[in-house]
Amino acid sequence: MKSRIKTQYPGVYYLESTSKMGKEEKIFYIVYRLDGKQIEEKVGRSIRDDMTPAKANRIRVDRIERRELSNQGQRELVRNEKNKFTIAKLWDEYVSQKPIKGLVTDRGRFKNYLLPAFGDKEPQEIDQLSVARLKARLLKTLAPQTVKNTLELLRRIVNFGVDTNRCQPLPFKIEFPKVNNLTTEDLTPDQLQALLQAIEADPHPVAGPMMLTALYTGMRRGEMFRLEWKDLDFERGVIHLRDPKGGVDQTIPMNETVRNLFLSLPETSTYVFPNTTGGKLTDINKRTKAIAKKAGLPGDFRPLHGLRHTFASMLASSGKVEMYTLQKLLTHKSPDMTQRYAHLRDEALQRAASVVDDIFKGTGSTIGY
């Protein structure tokens, strides 16, 4: 068996061989990992294909970054040529084969924005200018985060097609709009009081209790949608969060305030906050927005997400909760997201430190160091 000969490029090697003309020739191979699987494949010969170590390395990089299909992927693509996979067809395959978080939201973004623009095109037919024009058009009426999520959905659909050898990759990298994720929504004491009164007066059996749960625990909307009665451990005083945003099931403490709220709710379904038929709720925005409007809150205040921020802001500004503890309560994977509240804790510490000034003011103390 011929031995591999390494090149100066990691993951690129060659075997020595002889061409049909009897000349010495090198056969180049690349090795790389994709989705946790190691792939080893031939990329060309030095004489017949004019292959060099540098060219082999470029091919390797393109395949790692999904700009080019693997050898097997290209063979399967040829077999699938008669089945043209447009973006619309890829979407249908995508939703039928993959469990998707936020499917209702993704379906709306696809139907309203991606389908009209690219539904009848195959990924390799989409050019960078068309995506840039779509991005510019959407930014005129939508928030940057929504536009970013829409373009990310396009990327996910295409990556699914590439991974399953249904299509070629996009011939360019999508440029996402810049998003300021450090925006926090907070309420003044008067606004919070008005909101609590509006919630108490609202007859909807789910909207108000969900808003209170977000305020009392900092839970995310999706976590509340998925919350079942079996996730509430009243004996141990914890709430189990299944399949949260971070991906790993977690528990958060059940404080006395939210415990009393849960005990006051009727158990009419397996879900704590069910829809009208007892199934899983998927949207409550219209109802929570109506309550927020009745309370006189700003129009851009997002009730559930904003109350999660209010929960975090109240704890941080109390000066009694460390940032690490707040990170765990909010189930942030990284402390970077929690740092947006650090200035509130700093202000609380500064207020505490100023108490020392108040104590010594007027004492006439001349002690110094």
Image (cartoon, rainbow, N blue to C red):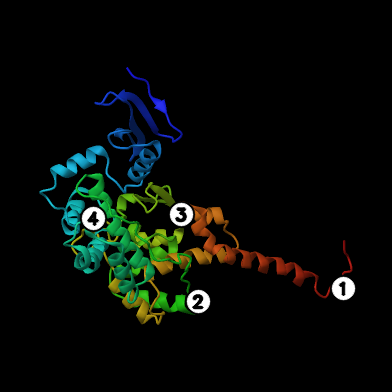
| Type of amino acid under label 2 | Thr
Question: Which amino acid, mark 1?
Answer: Gly
Gap in angstroms between the C-alphas marked 1 and 4 = 80 Å
- Left/right of residue 322 with respect to residue 269 in the rendered view: right
Residue at point 49% right, 63% down?
A: 312
Q: Position of residue 52 (x, y in %)?
A: 37, 37
Task: Name the residue rendered at 31%, 24% in the picture.
Answer: 17
Q: Nearer the viewer, mark 1 or mark 4?
A: 4
Mark found first going from the N terminus, 1 or 3: 3
For marks 2 and 4, the one nearer the N-term is 4
Give the crowd class for mark 1: few <14, some 14-19, many >=20 residues within 10 Å. few
Q: Nearer the viewer, mark 4 or mark 3?
A: 4
Residue 288 to residue 254: above or below: below
Residue 332 is marked as: 3
Percent across and percent down for residue 104 are 24, 62
Q: Could you say which is closer to the camera, residue 238 or residue 348?
A: 348
**Extreme residue toward the right, this view:** 366
**In which quarter of the view is residue 362 placed?**
bottom right
Secondary-structure class at tag 4: helix
Please identify, in this view, whether the residue under mark 2 or under mark 4 is nearer the observer: 4
Q: Residue 339: x percent and y percent?
A: 54, 60
Where disc 1 sits, the SS reads: loop
Q: CA distance from mark 1 to mark 2?
A: 38 Å
Q: Earlier in the sequence, mark 2 or mark 3?
A: 2
Residue 272 seen from this side: no
- Check disc 4 and give the amino acid type: Gln
Residue denoted by label 1: 364
The amino acid type, in three-letter code, at marker 3 is: His
Find disc 2 in the rendering and name its residue.
188
